[in-house]
Image (cartoon, rainbow, N blue to C red):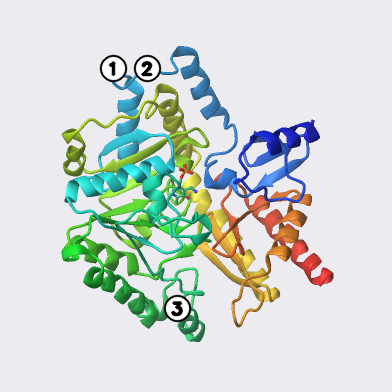
Amino acid sequence: EYNTLRTLKDKHVVPCIQQYYKTPLLINEGKMQWLFDHDGRRYLDMFGGIVTVSVGHCHPKVCEAARKQMEKLWHTTNIYMHPNLYTYAEKLTSKLPGDLKVVYFLNSGSEANDLALLLARAYTQNYDIISFRNCYHGMSPYVMGVTALSTWRFNFPVMHGFHHTMNPDVYKGLWGGKLCRDSPSQTTRDCNCLGGKCQASDNYYNQLEEIFKYSLPRGKVAGIIAESIQGVGGTVQFPKGFLKKAFHLVRTNGGLCISDEVQTGFGRTGEHFWGFEMHDVIPDIVTLAKGIGNGFPLSAVITTPKIAETLGHALHFNTYGGNPVATAVGMSVLEVIEEEKLQQNCKDVGTYLINELEKLRDEFEWVGDVRGKGLMIGVELVADKETRDPFPAKYFVDLMEDCKNMGLLLGRGGLNGNVIRIKPPMCITKEDAGFTVSVLRRALLNHEERR
Ligand code: PMP
């Protein structure tokens, strides 16, 4: 079966999707934090289908909600009314602060971000959008312009009107790396270098100001879009206070602030339900996908009534957005997060896991940095702790393969592909965290022996 499928894949499926493993995994089944391959082998899924399986694979309550709705009605159109859409919209927006009370349902993160950019442009009547280098916001044409990770670029220019400001990366950024290394109060996890008064942070802020001075017509902007913690870019966090200052600058120049909560939303970061809360900001527009549907295609743009009004000026339509099944799934995902206190679990298990991973950082010369919040964790592997040069790709592949063979699935990210991404279903236990660290430790020891 495996070989037949391999042949079909090579013949009929586009080649842009890279398989992580030397012998690609053929996954047949999922149950909560576990995945099972075609031979029935069990793996602890510490990547959650790229940060998407929030409450657990095939969670019984979510399955039941989907099944019930599927037997009743799969699809109608938003031209008619359907109760799920409105009750879920009320429930979902009740989780958001301030005036963020109006929702538009779509089907993917890219679609949500596309709409957010359109909304910012339509509302402000400005055109230019700012994003952070090393960000990932999706692959549809609009958002391909804001996604600023060169690994995702084709060899033609992006649309005009997109500006990529320097990413205040305090671990290996142009300024941050050096200064943070010298700073006695460095904690990369909180990025609170020198109590938030780190000069590097100011340098990055000046870069953002330069864009207003030199690149924007009349210094005006439609908006800025930011992940609360960069995900695909390798779990990169902003220095404390940075995003708040950046949002303020954008607003004073006529723009809206968009928080992409596709990865950081729904309690994953532990301390807060939304990632932007850790930056002490309330955005004008929030985009949600991935964890919102636990793997079912569902996404959302949430904004204020005033901004949403702009969409009344033209027809704007999405066939599947907010369909009865998607909204039934979304509602039950939210209920499970609350009932099973998954945000608290992210905080407890995440804190434990980060502490254990930090021990690996102290033990191994290749573990350069451990960062993140809750169950959104990055472990940056380096060739050398001093230079912070990336761990060679060929060794990284071996390490991932080793972990897989020991029953552990991890993610990979960052511009150089040298960051282990740990973003499991939010239901994992302390034992699972312990297993993760022990397997990773074994794989690092194997690497040491192989060298
Ligand atoms: N925003 C972020 C932060 C993401 O991580 C992703 C997907 N990795 C997207 C947007 C795009 O989502 P989708 O693949 O559903 O279009």
Quarter occupied by the N terminus: top right
Q: Which residue is mark 3?
A: 176
Q: Mark 1 or 3 closer to N-term?
A: 1
Q: Nearer the viewer, residue 437 or 173?
A: 173
Which amino acid type is shown beneath numbered disc 2?
Thr
Cα separation, mark 3 vs mark 2, equals 52 Å
Q: Which residue is mark 2?
A: 76
433 on left or right of 24:
left
Q: Nearer the viewer, residue 157 or 224?
A: 157
111 on left or right of 12:
left
Cα separation, mark 2 vs mark 1, equals 7 Å
Residue 353 can be seen in this image: yes
Q: Residue at x 47, y 81 (%)?
A: 180
Q: Secondary structure under badge 2?
A: loop
Determine crowd level at label 1: few under 14, some 14-19, many 20+ residues with C-alpha closer than 10 A. Answer: few
Cα separation, mark 1 vs mark 3, equals 53 Å
Q: Are marks 2 and 1 in contact (CB under 8 Å)?
A: yes
